[in-house]
Image (spheres, rainbow, N blue to C red):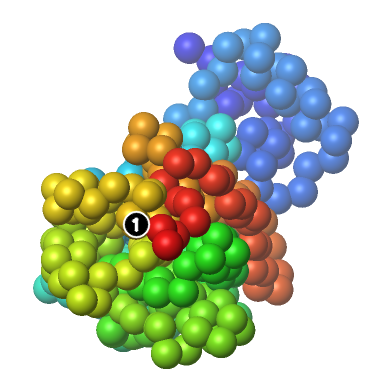
Amino acid sequence: MSTIADVAARAGVSKATASRALSGGGYVSDAARTRVLTAASELDYIAHSSAMSLATGRSLSVGVILPALDRWFFTELLAGIQDELLASGLDLVLYGIGEGTAERARLFEKVLPRRRLDGIIAVGIQPSARELERLVQVDSPLVSVGAYREHTSAVSIDDAAAARIATEHLIDLGHRDIVFLCGRADAATHAYGDEQRRAGYRSAMTAADLESHIRFAEGAPTMPGGYEAGVRMLGDRQHRPTAVLAVCDEAAIGAMIAARRLGLSVPAELSIVGIDDHEHAEMFTLTTVRQQPRAQGRAAVELLRQHIKAPDAASVQRVLPSELVVRASTAVPRA
């Protein structure tokens, strides 16, 4: 088996230069890098992660923090992160821990400060627990997905705009009594994206002079949560809305199932819009605002790599586009 010394000898460079060329860390001239890569290919050289770590002073691993591993958005996001990390020669260290747990608090207070990581990607961090501030104190390159604060880099969609676009679609169809489904009253302190979506809904309703129709039906942002909130809301015939904007597609699908079990026709008697373009959205013919979590994951890794190479670089907020996808769950309200 070839060693780094063999590669360096064939390329005519020092072992340190060969290590830098193969790891991508530190300066190496284009000509030297080409010789090293050519030599490594000819010798079928495979770098050992421990040896590379010793040579470069890097762990060659990135910590990824997720609040859940059983939700479509997070699994898609993780797939994008993993694909990009593997392509970059970096290992993934996964922490999938739900919010509000003692294990999560311990992760931020004790585990991460002791762990040697080249960088951290944090998804769904909680403002109320001051998690972002704690991550900044870890003093490792950091990129968050969703939440954005000054002096930290982030990848996200414009959540407020997504909810505004969805609400405006319902208003343009003629709906006035539109409920925002599964928005948490404490979203401002727990879920940054959810709070922005609530704000987008409120903004669209206010701009259309529909302030008196603004209503929130609280519930978990899941299919069961959407179903339970839908049953409560739609079971009240006197206050039943003509349209629903759900905080996410999973909640929207849950509400759609609730409507059908209550004997309501979608969209003839109730229009429903979600946000995400979940993998099941097409199957349920759900109108939604599409975002691409895999693309967000890849973008987060690209941004983190930039900060690893240049730790003092300015923070960046990268906003990815989203678009309205009209299917068969929305229509003009019944007269």
Mark 1, secondary structure of its residue? loop
Is residue 128 depicted above or below 16 in this figure?
below
Residue type at mark 1? Leu
Looking at the rendered image, the quarter that the C terminus falls into is bottom left
Is residue 114 depicted above or below 117 in this figure?
below
Q: Residues within 10 Å of mark 1 (few under 14, many from 20)?
A: many
Is residue 47 depicted above or below 112 in this figure?
above
Question: In percent of the image, x 78 and y 42: which residue is there?
Answer: 28
Depth check: 104 or 3 in front? 104
Residue at the limit of the structure toward the bottom, as seen here:
212
Depth check: 78 or 228 in front? 228
- Give the residue at mark 1: 270
- From the viewer's perspective, tell me whether residue 4 is left or right of residue 254: right
Depth check: 269 or 194 in front? 269
- From the viewer's perspective, tell me whether residue 157 is left or right of residue 329: right
* x, y percent for residue 324: 58, 52
Residue 2 figure quarter: top right
Question: In percent of the image, x 34 and y 81: which residue is there?
Answer: 215
* x, y percent for residue 334: 41, 58
Q: How many marks?
A: 1
* x, y percent for residue 315: 65, 72
* x, y percent for residue 12: 78, 24
Question: In percent of the image, x 42 and y 90: which residue is there?
Answer: 212
Depth check: 32 or 286 in front? 286
- From the viewer's perspective, tell me whether residue 21 is left or right of residue 281: right
For residue 134, say whether it is visible: no
Question: In percent of the image, x 54 and y 45: which residue is there?
Answer: 326
For residue 161, say whether it is visible: yes
- From the viewer's perspective, tell me whether residue 95 is left or right of residue 142: left
